[in-house]
Amino acid sequence: MIWGAIAHGLQTDLIIINGTVNTECYIHDIIKKSNVIQLANSEYGEFKWIFQQDGACPHTSKKNFYLLKTKMQCSRPLAPQFSRFKSYREFMVNYGH
């Protein structure tokens, strides 16, 4: 698998993962090694951005949410309006334009 993050004025290095990506791999080998949190904070201000993920199991695991909300010292839930929906599609039906 190849992972990378892009946004206006920001991009991470591509990370290549051989094999299956589980929660531990996603947290340690992707989120932490890519420095995506620090890069986004530097570019947009401390947590003045939304880290958008799809519904893949490593993205929705309790460990991942715990890391993003507490260990990265995010003072608010990331995309709180999205958290109550089961999928991005359901979110867009309710909030999309």
Image (cartoon, rainbow, N blue to C red):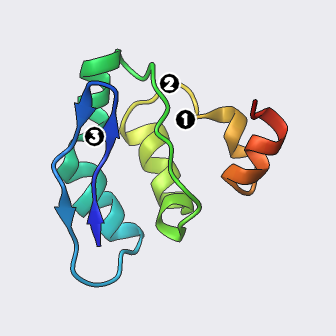
According to the picture, the residue beneath numbered tag 2 turns out to be: 75
Q: Secondary structure at mark 3?
A: helix
Q: Nearer the viewer, residue 26 or 74?
A: 26
Residue at position x 68%, y 41% from top? 82
Residue ranking furthest to the front: 97
Instruction: Tell me the quadrant of the picture where the N terminus can be found.
Output: bottom left
The amino acid type found where label 2 is placed reads Ser
User: Which label sits on residue 78?
Assistant: 1
Residue 9: percent from left, percent from top: 26, 24
Q: Residue furthest top?
A: 45
Numbered marks: total: 3
Q: Position of residue 93 (x, y in %)?
A: 82, 44
Give the CA separation, mark 3 to mark 1: 14 Å
What separation in Å lies between label 2 and label 1 (alpha carbons)?
9 Å
**Quadrant of the drawing holding the C terminus:** top right
Disc 2/disc 3 C-alpha distance (Å): 17 Å
- On the image, the x and y values in percent for residue 60 come to 56, 60
**Which quadrant of the figure has residue 25?**
bottom left
Label 3 belongs to which residue? Answer: 36
Looking at the rendered structure, the secondary structure element under dot 1 is loop
Image marks 2 and 3: residues in contact by CB distance under 8 Å:
no
Q: Residue furthest bottom?
A: 19
Q: Earlier in the sequence, mark 3 or mark 1?
A: 3
**Image coordinates for residue 43, horizontal then vertical, percent:** 27, 20
Residue in view at x 50 percent, y 51 percent: 53
Local packing at callout 3 (Cα closer than 10 Å; few below 14, some 14-19, many 20+) is many
Vertically, is 28 above or below 67? below
Give SS at disc 2.
loop
Q: Is residue 80 left or right of residue 63?
A: right
